[in-house]
């Protein structure tokens, strides 16, 4: 069976895509949903002066807001209906996963299967609405306090503007949450990751053009730009290598007799990825770091006008791009979420119990508790290397961005998201194509087996 699957994978080509009707429908649905998302990033919220806002954002785009705008696909800089993007949903998912780990009630819900998962997802959606409302109100208040040389960014500040801004931004986030779930269910790939991916990729051409313009004006040397291109290629190659790296644990199944026939006795392997958490830790870390930094930045801007925002300005400075405190918190959050998410998706005790239930064992390791300890031993060391790899990939480009004004889209976090989501989406497309070829082989065998 394994050799047949390898043969199908070897013969796989995109020419078979024309015959895979269901896969084509999924791809077209995904592309259509992403086009809808990109159109929404150009619909502004009411009551904003776009010229003044663009000027103010340009002055502060080098800080944490620039990174938020990268994840939002430029929607924050244009202050559109998708300005909050999908970040409140990600933050709510983080909180729910933490609560699931510490709350016995939620932990029991998780073990109830599909019904429990639906309830947890519903709680996550409620949390998304609350977090989006809080962040939207903070943005509306911050916008009212932002003023440039040409006047205030808000045309008519007041309670009505705050209410319409909160309703619009919360509605945009809820729509994106629904759109991401639809892509996951009816399209190809993970919908939430693809939305973030689309926002980053959409602005890559303008980021490249901006970098070349800096080279033309002399702000960046030609040698530095060439070194930057080589570094980007090297980082992408390194990410692909690490994301495909895995530790294969040999699992042996004993022979058993059923009637006059012998079954089992074959050896298999359990693959453990070096980076089990994937792109989740940097996204989680960014979303958590963006909330206090953005609120501090907005509050500092508003308080400065009244003369009472000194301490908020200090917080905003310390959480600025490339600052030691920002880098330390960012790296710490990435490492924490790498271990946390790995513990969520892979439970050594459950895996050891399942192996014992079906008679499998690891050569040289006793089933049960010893197998659990062995899994924990291997997984801890793999996750340590994977967490350090994620921190290194995300932190080093941050220093280049802060020191040399390199666009955010060439940073480690954005490259990691783009490469990982691309690998995952291509893998799902290949899986659909293999399944389609299997269906074709089964149909042919049935037709050949019919009596004439």
Image: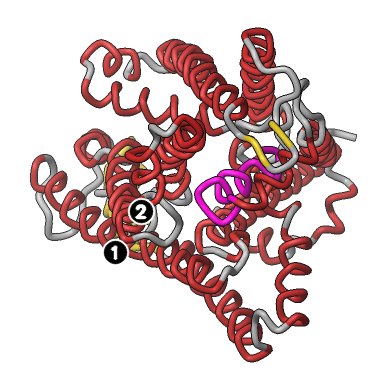
In this picture, residue 94 sits left or right of residue 294: left
Where, quadrant-wise, is the C terminus in this rendering? top right
Q: Residue at x 25, y 26 (%)?
A: 101
Q: Give the range drawn in magenta.
A: 60-76
Residue 385: mark in rendering = 1
Farthest residue to the bottom: give it: 223
In this picture, residue 137 sits left or right of residue 409: left
140 inside magenta stretch: no
- State which quadrant residue 173 falls in: top right
Q: Which residue is drawn at 78% across and 69% down?
A: 209
Q: Position of residue 407 (x, y in %)?
A: 62, 64
Residue 385, compared with residue 342, is above or below; it is below
Residue 141, compared with residue 196, is above or below; it is above
Q: Mark 2 points at which residue?
A: 326
Farthest residue to the front: give it: 307
Callout 2 crowding tier (Cα within 10 Å): few <14, some 14–19, many ≥20: many
For the residues labelled 2 and 1, the Cα–Cα distance comes to 22 Å
Q: Where is residue 362 in the image (x, y as percent from the top left)?
A: 20, 54
Q: Position of residue 290 (x, y in %)?
A: 46, 40
Q: Is residue 58 visible?
A: yes
Callout 1 crowding tier (Cα within 10 Å): few <14, some 14–19, many ≥20: some
Instruction: Give SS at disc 1.
Output: helix
Q: Which residue is drawn at 49% across and 19% down?
A: 134
Give the colouring mode of the picture. secondary structure
Q: Earlier along the polypeptide chain: callout 2 or callout 1?
A: 2
Front tag of 2 and 1: 2
- Depth check: give the residue in front, 306 or 311: 306
């Amino acid at each position: 069976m394994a050799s047949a699957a390898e043969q199908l994978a070897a013969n796989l080509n995109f020419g078979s895509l024309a015959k895979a009707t269901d896969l084509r429908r999924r791809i077209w649905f995904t592309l259509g949903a992403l086009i809808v998302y990109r159109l929404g990033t150009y619909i502004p919220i009411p009551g904003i002066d776009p010229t003044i806002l663009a000027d103010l954002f340009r002055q502060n785009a080098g800080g944490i807001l620039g990174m938020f705008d990268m994840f939002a696909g430029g929607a924050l800089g244009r202050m559109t209906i998708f300005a909050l993007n999908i970040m409140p949903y990600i933050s709510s998912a983080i909180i729910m996963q933490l609560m699931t780990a510490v709350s016995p009630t939620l932990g029991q819900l998780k073990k109830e299967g599909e019904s429990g998962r639906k309830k947890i997802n519903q709680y996550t959606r409620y949390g998304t609405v609350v977090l989006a409302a809080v962040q939207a109100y903070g943005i509306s208040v911050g916008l009212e306090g932002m003023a440039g040389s040409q006047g205030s960014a808000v045309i008519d500040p007041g309670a009505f503007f705050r209410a319409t801004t909160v309703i619009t931004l919360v509605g945009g986030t809820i729509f994106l949450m629904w759109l991401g779930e639809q892509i996951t269910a009816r399209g190809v790939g993970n919908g939430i990751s693809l939305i973030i991916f689309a926002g980053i990729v959409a602005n890559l051409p303008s980021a490249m053009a901006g970098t070349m313009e800096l080279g033309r004006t002399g702000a960046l040397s030609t040698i530095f730009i060439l070194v930057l291109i080589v570094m980007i290629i090297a980082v992408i190659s390194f990410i692909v290598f690490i994301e495909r790296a895995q530790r294969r644990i040999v699992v042996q199944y004993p022979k058993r007799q059923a009637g006059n026939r012998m079954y089992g006795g074959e050896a298999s392997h359990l693959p453990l990825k070096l980076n089990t958490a994937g792109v989740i830790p940097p996204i989680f870390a960014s979303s958590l770091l963006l909330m206090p930094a953005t609120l501090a930045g907005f509050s500092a801007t508003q308080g400065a006008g009244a003369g009472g925002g000194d301490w908020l300005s200090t917080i905003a400075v310390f959480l600025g791009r490339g600052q030691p405190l920002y880098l330390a918190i960012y790296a710490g959050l990435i490492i924490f979420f790498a271990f946390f998410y790995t513990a969520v998706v892979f439970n050594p005790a459950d895996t050891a119990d399942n192996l014992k239930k079906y008679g499998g064992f690891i050569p040289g390791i006793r089933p049960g508790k010893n197998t659990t300890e062995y899994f924990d031993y291997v997984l801890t060391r793999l996750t340590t290397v994977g967490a350090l790899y994620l921190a290194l990939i995300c932190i080093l480009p941050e220093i280049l961005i802060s020191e040399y004004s390199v666009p955010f889209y060439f940073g480690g976090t954005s490259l990691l998201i783009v490469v990982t989501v691309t690998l995952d989406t291509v893998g799902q497309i290949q899986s659909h194509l293999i399944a389609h070829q299997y269906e074709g082989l089964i149909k042919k065998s049935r037709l050949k087996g019919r009596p004439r």
